[in-house]
Image (cartoon, rainbow, N blue to C red):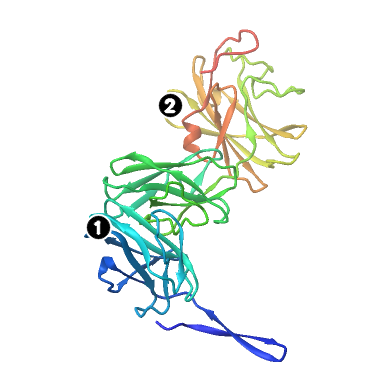
Amino acid sequence: MKMTHKATLILLAGLTLSFPAYAAISTANFHGAMNGWGTDAMTLGSGVWRITILSDGNDASSAFLFDEGGDYDPKWGRGDVVSFATVDTAYNNGGNSLFNETTGKYYTFALGKDPIAYQNSGLVIQETSNNPITVSRSGEESGGVMDPGDPNTISVTLSSSTHSEDIYVRYTTDAWSSSQFAAASGAGTAYTATIPGQSRNTSVEYYAFTTTFASPSHANSDLETLTYNTDGANATYTVSDLGNSWSRPYQTVPGTAVKYLSNGSGGYAFNGSEPTAWICTGTQYQGGGDQATPSGLSLYHKKSTDGSWTETTGSSDSMNGNDEFWKVALVFASHGYVEGDIIQYYFKQTYSSGEATTYIYADAPPTTSLITSFDATAKAAPFSFQYGLIETGSIVTLH
């Protein structure tokens, strides 16, 4: 194909000079000893032209070239030996590229990225024992959301268990200004890769790919790729912007009389004579960092032997330093709780400052707490205490 270009005019000392501005090529072809110097069309993907060819004979100096339209104008060649799994340069109007061809092997040739007519371009050859596998992927994020700090395990399914290439998940947290790679491992056709946990309010985009490069690079990742996942567009998820909220049963807020779980007399015991449990959360509402403004609190509670949860709402109680405390009154008789019942509970805290609804549930040990975007996660690990338990000292045993 003849060149397609626009003219760029520059005026210099009364002279008009014209320089061609070449366009990205619209087709690419492979010519070489492997196909009898015929013309085999290449396929474009993510700005890189590729073709895979099966060798039918040994050739220590197998020669090839690329061109755009089948007439070698423009054309690209290395004019030298090309090593496998190495990013080389294919020169505009360069001489034949050479490589060591082995019968029975598959060779994937790549030209790019975004090659421009009559300009040098990137060149890669990757050798595999079989036709390159394809991969599909599925993430563990729920509805496109993950909790802060939670790793995301990506399932990658291979089209064949017989392969010589490596499998990776490439991901970015800054819209591909940079990227990282998570190597996948597994057996047969089932592989997994793990994207590390990210901080709150982070957007993550990812895809799976195969390569024979030992250490794929951000700058040349597309050239170094053999195949991408077959699932279409990249997958995305967001790490929730949770509120900085907590609850610490059987502890007192330093410097205050606020207790996160107490009876009506201000103590920790629930010996049957106290009709109410006061249950509290704290939230950082000022001081910078992960501050949030609480707007509502729900306590979900039940007997340990019950299947359904009951919701009781709370209200703002007090402030101390940078923290605001909300409190719920759990009246035992109102919910049919009797002495001996183990009562389970967790919280839902909402905010007027834009943070995601935050569920607060028990850590291990359960005197501290964790937060999540997901109601089901909190339900699976609630706080608990026994109504009718006699206090011994200042701390009672949690269940």
Count of marks, rendered view: 2
Q: Gap between marks 2 and 1, in whole Å?
A: 73 Å
Residue at the farthest bottom position: 14
| Residue ID for mark 2 | 306
Q: Is residue 85 visible?
A: yes
x, y percent for residue 256: 76, 23
Amino acid found under the numbered disc labelled 2? Asp
Q: Are marks 2 and 1 in contact (CB under 8 Å)?
A: no
Query: Taking 179 as reference, is 100 left or right?
Result: left
Query: Taking 212 as reference, is 267 left or right?
Result: right
Q: Residue at x 49, y 57 (%)?
A: 220
Q: Which mark is residue 58?
A: 1
Which is more foreground, mark 2 or mark 1?
1
Q: Residue at x 46, y 60 (%)?
A: 88
x, y percent for residue 147: 53, 40
Q: Residue at x 67, y 46 (%)?
A: 352
Amino acid found under the numbered disc labelled 1? Asn
Of 147 and 14, nearer the camera is 14
